[in-house]
Amino acid sequence: MSSFATHTVFNQVPPLEDYSLYDTDPALRAAVSREGALAWTGELAAHGAWLGRAQTLEAGAQVNRSLPQLLSYDRSGHRIDHIDFHPSWNLLMGGIIARGLHSRAWAQPEPGAQVARAAAYVMQGQVEAGTLCPTTMTFAAVPLLQREPSGAVDFGGLWLTALYSREFDGADAPMSAKRGALIGMGLTEKQGGSDLRAVSTRAVPLEAAGRGNPYLLVGHKWFLSVPQADAHLVLAQTDEGLSCFFVPRWIPDGPRNAVRLRRLKDKLGNCSNASAEVEFEDAWGVLMGEPGRGLAVLLEMAATTRLDCVLGSAALLRQALVQAAHHARHRHAFGKTLLEQPLMRNVLADLALESEAAMALGLRLARAVDERADAQARALVRVGTPAAKLWVCKRAVAAVGECMEVWGGNGYVEEGPMPRLYRETPVNSIWEGSGNVMALDVLRALQREPEALPALEREFASAKGQNRDFDDALARWHALLADGAQAELQARRIAGGLARLWQAALLIQYAPQAVGQAFAASRLREGGGIFGELAAGTDTQAILARAWPAAAC
């Protein structure tokens, strides 16, 4: 027998699986109740349990190992522009559609529906982020289609029935043969990027011009979201100006549309989700909205997709935090678990503050969407969504990187979850408008929406007088806002400051005192830097117990 052993495995962390994403998140449960979605608790608990199953978690890993493939032709040489996905994609999409994350809040607009959907989205994004793209695109398109009169396309009957369906149907088939549907979007072109007025794709009416009538599109898109979708909302130039078109994958009662997928993008992250370059070769489409008003139509859609960017970043931040806390609880170094090390507790508690603040602001904005009939709620969505997208999405990149560092070298290895979380995170800052676009949009909202600032003041009012750091930061923010000559130069400070103030106001009012005070002290005072700089005396035990109950053990 050998007299030595070189591979005794110990001090390795067991995988985190077969747990409930809902039951282990006290802050999320509190926000669901606070923001008006208590009636959905049972459904959210069931969803969180399904997501935490080992099988579901493995499906998320599988779709990122076996990436979608473009099949331009079938074996007989017919052009099909088909995208082939791993079977686990269908499992994950089936779970999303069955729970209605793609349309239910619009199809059944009950009180709290948007908040419940946002909470489910935050949990879903912790398991696999690529499937969120078709979910978001479809969700954002539904309210636009609800307003469109049926004409060349049967919006009110065939399409909305399929979009409201709770059955995922990934078949490439005419709409009349499908049990469900997904919608994508095609805006940006290679010469324009965020400057959508530079779109060069042209649309010419087949007969009469105008809303609901068919056109032929010629041009390209540098990024086509969800290229396998049953239809896309596309920007194109007309004689009246930039307009929005509904471009189905199959022409009604006709052949496959002339939408040619040239290649799939080789992306840094979000790899399970296909994105394509596309050319329109007299593609058939129907004008949506008024001619020349396409940008207004798509910007309305962007308000919804941008909130999902916030929720998606909150999801990645939460999962990275949970993985870091789980690792620290089980990994030993220098005679103690990592979780017992004071400096590690400081880092994890700081990350926990960031995570709860991101989620709390996201769900508060979702409640404003629920209350959109009210002018002040609409103003909060208008000004708060770009501010939250700027701040939360950027902070998530640094926070997820810090969580990866908690794992040490193991966090840099592809067999674990951290590399995928890290690669997923930057896209939410870029997608649907980069940081500068968001900051300038906040300025426009503050300048043009008379209800915006008063609505924000009402949000801040309940926190005023409770925390000196908050009061001082609010005064500095007002002074910054008053300096109109420097507003554009300081737009990021204005937008980021708004997001931090709103997060602090929520935590000061509704989170345990240790959480609210620590957030205000660490985020609102001048200065600050890397995670793990919480002041002496911060109750890291209380913060960690709220963030990940197992950490209190």
Image: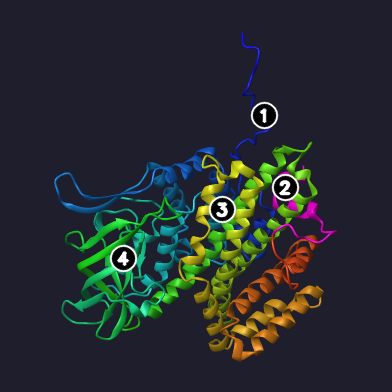
Location of mark 3 (residue): 123
Which is closer to the viewer, label 1 or label 4? 1
541 relative to 273 in the view: left or right? right
499 relative to 346 in the view: left or right? left
Q: Considering only order in the chain, which callout, 2 or 4, is on the residue closer to the N terminus?
A: 4
Q: Which residues are magenta?
A: 531-553
Residue at position x 57%, y 43% in the image: 52
- Tell me the element at label 2: helix
Which is closer to the viewer, label 1 or label 3? 1
Residue 139 belongs to magenta span: no
| Quadrant including the N terminus | top right
- Tell me the element at label 4: helix
Q: Name the foreground residue: 495 vs 156.
A: 495
Residue at position x 80%, y 73% in the image: 467
Q: CA distance from mark 1 to mark 4?
A: 60 Å
Q: Are marks 4 and 2 in contact (CB under 8 Å)?
A: no
Q: CA distance from mark 4 to mark 2?
A: 48 Å
Which amino acid type is shown beneath numbered disc 1?
Answer: Phe
Mark identifier at residue 157: 4
Q: Residues within 10 Å of mark 2 (few under 14, many from 20)?
A: some
Location of mark 2 (residue): 549
- Tell me the element at label 3: helix
Mark identifier at residue 10: 1
